[in-house]
Amino acid sequence: MNKDLFEKIAEECAQLNLSCTAEELAQISLENCFDGESLHALDTVMAHLAQKKHQALVDIRLRTSRLPLQNPKTFDNFDFSRLYRQDKERLKEMQMLAPLYARKNVALIGPPGTGKTHLAQAFGYECCQQGINTYFLKMTELREKMDNARHNGTTANLLKSLVHPACLIIDEVGHCHFDKEDTRLFFDMVDRRYAKESDSTIIFTSNKMPSSWTEDFSDNDSLACAMDRAFDDALVIMISGSSYRGQRLERVTLRTEKPTL
């Protein structure tokens, strides 16, 4: 049992960037006549410090992710009961971040209000909880960033910032038009992420099928190359049904005159 405890404390030391092996801890214990109570006390302190450091890293990931910090969208507060097909189990599997580790992109496709953005943000939130760099932005924001970068001559910095996060979430694809230069930058971003060797995924949400995205880009050749890479190994999740929104809608009927008897 003490061996397992030494190894556990050594793991906690590693989480704190402290170099101390289980063998070293055992030697220190012998030299100082530590009893079981002393080891458990040390374990409690080290576990607390490790958890504190982990939470600090999670907080940093969340603040830089651009995900909503108040009332965050998570898998726990997504209403899976509204999904009826057997394939909903594939959505639940996303909680394990399998697409990220498998280097698969994900496209959540469906009409407004069916939970696409919630699921995308929940995936990003879970990434942050695991200490994984995540970045969320809407398609209109991506276009604005690209326009500004072109104007300021900072496209290289922008591409670097979009390629770096392991999880990149692009919400509402198809809600704005990309000119030729922005379409080429979009291709560059997808291409560089495609070439990454580390864990990586792009989560897209859209009301449109990917085959219809050509309507919103000006350079079909660049878009075709981007789509070829983005969907080379991807998971496309189709969500249908009525909107979640409006569930708390209240209706009040008023009259402006007294009804006649």
Image (tube, helix red, strand yellow):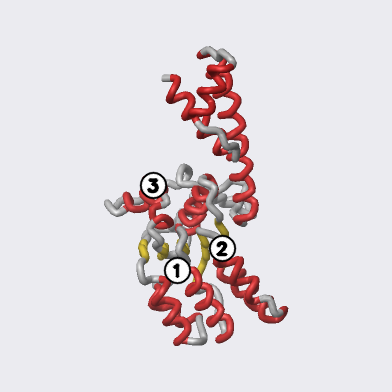
The residue positioned 52% from the left and 65% from the top of the image is 170
Residue that mark 2 sits on:
164
The residue positioned 68% from the left and 76% from the top of the image is 154
Mark 1 and mark 3: Cα distance apart in space: 20 Å
Regarding residue 162, the answer to whether it shows in the image is yes
The residue positioned 49% from the left and 29% from the top of the image is 22
Regarding residue 204, the answer to whether it shows in the image is no
Question: Callout 2: helix, strand or loop?
Answer: loop
Amino acid under disc 2: His
Image-quadrant location for residue 47: top right
Q: Earlier in the sequence, mark 2 or mark 1?
A: 2
Residue that mark 1 sits on:
207
Residue that mark 3 sits on:
80
Q: Are marks 3 and 2 in contact (CB under 8 Å)?
A: no
Of tags 3 and 2, the one toward the viewer is: 2
Question: Callout 1: helix, strand or loop?
Answer: loop
Of tags 2 and 1, the one toward the viewer is: 2
Q: Earlier in the sequence, mark 3 or mark 2?
A: 3
Residue 28 drawn above or below residue 161:
above
Q: Do the residues labelled 2 and 1 touch (CB within 8 Å)?
A: no
Marking on residue 221? none
Q: Which quadrant does the N terminus fall into?
A: top left
Q: Where is residue 102 in the image (x, y as percent from the top left)?
A: 38, 58
